[in-house]
Image (spheres, helix red, strand yellow):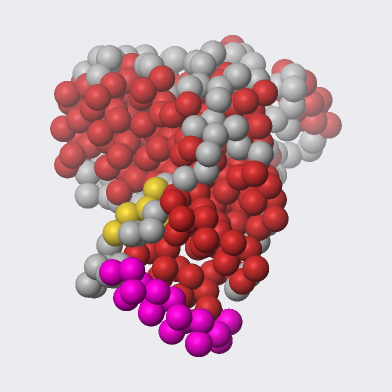
Amino acid sequence: MSESSTPLEALLFYAQMLSSLKNLDRVEFLLPALLKACSKSRALEEGRQVHGQIVKSQMLFDPYVANALIRMYSELGCIGLAQRVFDKIPERDQVSWNSLITGYLRVGEIELAQGIFNEIPERDLVSCNAMIDGYVKSGKCELAEDFFMTMQHKDVVTWTTMISGYVINDRPKEALALFREMLSQGIRPDAPALVSVLNIGDWNCMISGLAMHGLGHEALDIFLDMKMRGIEPDEITFLGLLTACNHGGLVDEGRYCFELMQDKYRLVPKIQHYGCIVDLLGRAAHLEEAVNVIRNMPLEADAIVWKAILSTCTIHGNVAIGESASLKAIDLAPEDSSCYILLSNLYAKVGRWDDVAKVRLMMKQRGVQKIPGSSSVLVNSLWGRK
């Protein structure tokens, strides 16, 4: 009833229903929805009439009805009436307290909201998050920060509210620092709530941070939000997006981003971009497509790209493409032990032990030594050691 596109229809329906009823049994089940309709349609006078009926029928003792009444007055900005209802109800639950606190914060009465908060028998995340939101929107970012730091339990709303608070108070560095801390603690961000960006560098930092934590979909959501705000992406943006797709195994999305940067934004991919898309396609077993990308590159593929192919061939046991990629990689980087080790691993995967021995002999003859205690890993399509 309250979700109607024209909430006033709910009020008319209720009035017609009352005229046909002999008693008010079970009417209390309709009242929360009716009061919500009054709030949505800004129908204060009608809401007060419903309030009068509630008092006469003694339905104020019903906690759902009482809380709906407090919420209606709070949302309509009539915090004094909300406080009167709160004072009269015999039993107050967490919803009662939270609704009143939110009401005071909505009209900017921060100190009164703090006073109510201090009286709550048991505080929950809803009330705590409301206080942070109230502080930041009233320009009291330091108080919000102190409050945030004292909270033992936080959810994604807590983090994003504080991050957004830094932004609206012109503190982007703190916003980004907190964003990174949130990721490090394994909190999955809510992209629509994160508006903590003022320039392309900040957006890129957020996308890259999500990519490094394997949150591909979230990185793409940030990119969509970025486009909606009219911020033009650059080469670093797309490197972050391709990395995010790579880490998340998002093949179709990766193809889309790779084409988008060229077709719409007229950006020329660099070797790092090609390395990402090649590695993404290879890991998804699209090895022929990955090789075709390399063949059609307008620049010469380096050892990094060929090792990306070789690495994925090792995963999927594709000896034919892997051997070809290894020849290219070794030719370009003859002293890089990882080229030989990857080829050796490929042979070992398919049980070609004689070839494993040949590769090791080749390394010995060429004086190529594997760094003790190290293995080759591909990170962001750039080879490193660990």
Q: Quadrant of the N terminus?
A: top right
Using the rendered image of the protein, determine whether residue 321 is visible from the camera's viewpoint: yes
Nearer to us in this view, 267 or 361: 361
Tell me residue 144's x, y (percent): 22, 28
Q: Residue at x 36, y 31 (%)?
A: 205
Q: Quadrant of the C terminus?
A: bottom left
Nearer to us in this view, 252 or 328: 328
Q: Is residue 364 magenta?
A: yes
Tell me residue 272's x, y (percent): 46, 39
Tell me residue 299's x, y (percent): 55, 34
Left or right: 94, with 273 as reference point: left
Q: Quadrant of residue 149?
A: top left
Up the image or down, 184 lies above or below 145; here it is below
Q: Magenta part of the protein: which range?
A: 349-367
Q: Residue at x 69, y 50 (%)?
A: 289
Nearer to us in this view, 194 or 358: 358
Using the rendered image of the protein, determine whether residue 117 is visible from the camera's viewpoint: no
Left or right: 23, with 330 as reference point: right
Left or right: 338, with 136 as reference point: right
Q: Residue at x 27, y 42 (%)?
A: 181
Nearer to us in this view, 154 or 380: 380
Up the image or down, 185 lies above or below 9; here it is below
Q: Residue at x 74, y 19 (%)?
A: 6
Q: Main secondary structure of the magenta part?
A: helix
Tell me residue 26's x, y (percent): 68, 45
Q: Quadrant of residue 21?
A: top right
Q: How many marks?
A: 0
Q: Residue furthest front?
A: 365
Q: Quadrant of residue 370?
A: bottom left
Q: Is residue 385 magenta?
A: no
Q: Residue furthest right?
A: 20
